[in-house]
Image (cartoon, rainbow, N blue to C red):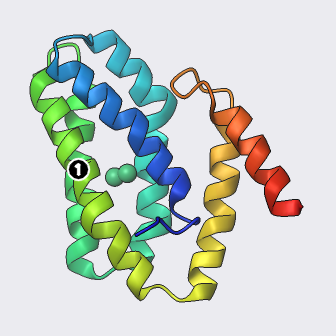
């Protein structure tokens, strides 16, 4: 099923995370680089998900979201000495859970009004990261989507 537009900015962030997790797996990523990804994108992504998606799900799901973020955050904040392989595996598994379970659950349970409000927020959030070095085409894609939506 196609991802609801309100969640697509988060899903596009997930592509960046999955690419990085795969690089860790290949031994092709270093701690300093992860620290940069964390500071520039992931930390904010986690906070935005908790703030915007937390209210849309039940207690168990919200607890899992926050607990998985906390486990990754702990490693990310001590990445120089952390087990980078474990960090990559946790990140990969977390993103897959969100894409396979969390996002479909929200698409099924949230009202149209909730999804519309979510979409307004995620569009603004993504626009603030238009010049990201992690997703070089993000700015260009943002502009073309905005163009299409006003056509
Ligand atoms: Fe997350
Ligand atoms: Fe996420």
Residue 135: quarter of image? top right
Kindly identify the residue that appears in the image at 19 percent across and 31 percent down: 88
Residue found farthest to the right: 151
Task: Please state which of residues 97 and 1 is positioned toward the viewer in this rendering.
Answer: 1
Q: Where in the figure is residue 87, as x and y percent of width and height? A: 17, 31
Whether residue 121 sits left or right of residue 3 in the image: it is right
Is the C terminus in the top left, top right, bottom left or bottom right quadrant?
bottom right
Residue 139: quarter of image? top right
Q: Is mark 1 within 8 Å of ligand 1?
A: yes
Determine which residue is flagged by label 1.
94
Whether residue 125 sits left or right of residue 140 in the image: it is left
Residue 42: quarter of image? top left
Q: Residues within 10 Å of mark 1 (few under 14, many from 20)?
A: some
Kindly identify the residue that appears in the image at 59 percent across and 70 percent down: 118
Count of marks overlaid on the render: 1
Q: Where in the figure is residue 62, as x and y percent of width and height? A: 29, 70
Whether residue 133 sits left or right of residue 24 in the image: it is right
Is the N terminus in the top left, top right, bottom left or bottom right quadrant?
bottom left
What is the secondary structure assignment of the residue under circle 1?
A: helix
Kindly identify the residue that appears in the image at 36 percent across and 14 percent down: 33
Q: Where in the figure is residue 13, as x and y percent of width and height? A: 46, 42
Task: Please state which of residues 46 and 22 is positioned toward the viewer in this rendering.
Answer: 22
Kindly identify the residue that appears in the image at 78 percent across and 42 percent down: 143
- Does 78 appear above or below 123? above
- Does 88 appear above or below 145? above
């Amino acid at each position: 099923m196609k991802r609801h537009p309100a969640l697509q900015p988060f899903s596009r962030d997930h592509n960046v995370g999955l690419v990085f997790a795969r690089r860790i797996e290949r031994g092709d990523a270093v701690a300093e680089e992860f620290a940069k990804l964390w500071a520039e994108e992931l930390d904010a992504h986690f906070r935005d998900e908790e703030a915007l998606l937390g209210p849309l799900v039940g207690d168990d799901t919200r607890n899992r979201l926050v607990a998985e973020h906390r486990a990754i955050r702990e490693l990310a904040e001590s990445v120089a000495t952390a087990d980078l392989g474990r960090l990559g595996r946790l990140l990969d598994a977390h993103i897959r859970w969100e894409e396979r379970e969390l996002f479909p659950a929200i698409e099924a349970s949230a009202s149209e009004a909730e999804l519309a409000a979510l979409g307004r927020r995620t569009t603004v959030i993504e626009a603030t990261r238009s010049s990201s070095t992690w997703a070089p085409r993000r700015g260009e894609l943002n502009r073309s989507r905005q163009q299409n939506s006003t056509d």
